[in-house]
Amino acid sequence: MARGRTAIVGGTVVGPLGSLAGDVLVEGGVIKEVGRIDSAGAELVHAGGCFVLPGAIDVHTHVFGGIRDDTRSALCGGTTSALAFVDALPGERPVEAARRTLADELPDSLIDLAFHAVIWEPDAYEAGDLRAVAELGVGSVKLWLAYLELGIMANDDVAFAVMQEAADLGVVVLAHCENGRVIDVLTRQLVDGGRLGIDSLPRSRPISLEAECIHRFLVLAELAGATPYVVHVTGRRPLEEIVAARARGMTVYAEVCSHHLLFDQSDQEGPDAIRYVMTPPLRTGDDRAALLEGLAGGGLDTYASDHCHLRLDRDKMPVRDDFTKIPTGLPGIGARLPLGFALNGDGQRLDVERLVEVACAAPARIFGLYPKKGVVAPGSDADIVVWDPSTPSRLTLDAINDGLDWSPYDGHDIPGTVRHVLARGDRVVEDGCWKETDHRGEYLPVRRVAAPV
Ligand code: URP
Ligand code: ZN
């Protein structure tokens, strides 16, 4: 795409530490100036009364399989980059999966993508697997500490070996923390008792098993010298484990996802239970309050979607009578940033600077993309969202625009509107409307490979 000069004028530029009235000059896909700019010859984007934010970064996404739809939705909602979990075919080594994904999936992405490697076959893990993906520019790896029944759960010995290799390389270790062995026992007891309804899902996955697993993950990471990142924290007890590890002096990163902030177990108990099937499951209202407090106060570092490209009609409804068969996860990549403005605990909203920190800046810093991404500053990619707080909007399937037949967030009221989005300088949303353009996403390699210790 031709990328000329664009000037975003009259808005308030937001960073994690503060906001300032100023203009932004974009040239060649990069931010040239912020503040007082020379806009001669530039296309003007009027941002009077609006916040000018860095393009948001979604650190927890499962987009492969529906990438064009998912990434279009992302742009419509102001998310211009994401970290995506790399899926693997049976027998594929992590580096082979990453290479195949780069070749087959990335060309269809409309947003910039970095990869998280995933240990899908823990018994096949070999030392050197992480070095190979790191050399391809992958700076993070995910361990499943649950899902024994799928054969993807890493036992402590493999998890520890992965963490040791990650520590040598400077690779961040993400973990899905739930005690998979005890969940397996509870699940079999529920199935043997004929209790196949959706209400058995939370019964089989109590919050104590999440807290226990986080504790274990952090102890192993500390011993291995790895940098741990806990995905989708769901409530007070898990958060206490993270706070306790930090009090011992550890660096621990922790993430919260939209669904755990917006819903609680009462949603899963109602007639629409099928719309709230995810792992870990929804918790109590008190847990939700603890998450909101943690996100506002610094206990939680990032705000993500855990987007899964799943249809209600084809993927979930046909198996709704058996909780062990329902595919878990919700779509939400496009809704995430707008919902961030609507997060509300005791009438208190997250302030816009904190939202920029958890949805844009911290994701970029933690995963090695800063300051190319995550900030409106000279030299950064011109990924920019103009957010209009004076025009309330409602999330609808049309607005979310991900091609799916449902959204758990359909009908949510948002105190504002995505007015404009620029992705590396390309105008992909103009005056609230998605524009079909030839803008394409790029791979974001992360250079982290350190000398072996
Ligand atoms: O239920 C969920 N969240 N499914 C996606 C996999 C995960 O746990 O991240
Ligand atoms: Zn996930």
Image (spheres, rainbow, N blue to C red):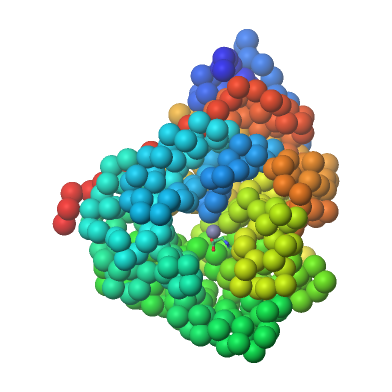
Q: Would residue 252 appear left or right of 81 to someone viewing this image?
A: left
Residue toward you, 60 or 287: 60
User: Hey, which quadrant is residue 285 in on the image?
Assistant: bottom right
Task: Report the quarter where the C terminus lies.
Answer: bottom left
Q: Would residue 161 appear left or right of 99 to someone viewing this image?
A: left
Q: Identify the residue shown where x is 76% and y is 31%.
A: 433
Q: Identify the residue shown where x is 71% and y is 54%.
A: 314
Q: Would residue 273 appear left or right of 92 to someone viewing this image?
A: right
Task: Report the quarter where the N terminus lies.
Answer: top right
Residue toward you, 349 or 231: 231
Q: Position of residue 399 (x, y in %)?
A: 77, 41
Q: Is residue 8 positioned above or below 329 on the image?
A: above
Task: Pick out the residue farthest to the top.
Answer: 41
Q: Position of residue 287 (x, y in %)?
A: 64, 76
Q: Position of residue 63 (x, y in %)?
A: 56, 46
Is residue 8 visible in this depiction of the protein? no
Q: Is residue 216 positioned above or below 6 on the image?
A: below
- Quadrant of the image where one finds ligand 2: bottom right
Q: How many marks?
A: 0
User: Hey, which quadrant is residue 187 in on the image?
Assistant: bottom right
Q: Would residue 216 appear left or right of 313 to someone viewing this image?
A: left
Is residue 119 visible in this depiction of the protein? yes
Task: Pick out the residue farthest to the left.
Answer: 453
Q: Identify the residue shown where x is 58% and y is 25%.
A: 439
Q: Identify the residue shown where x is 67% and y is 45%.
A: 334
Residue toward you, 240 or 132: 132
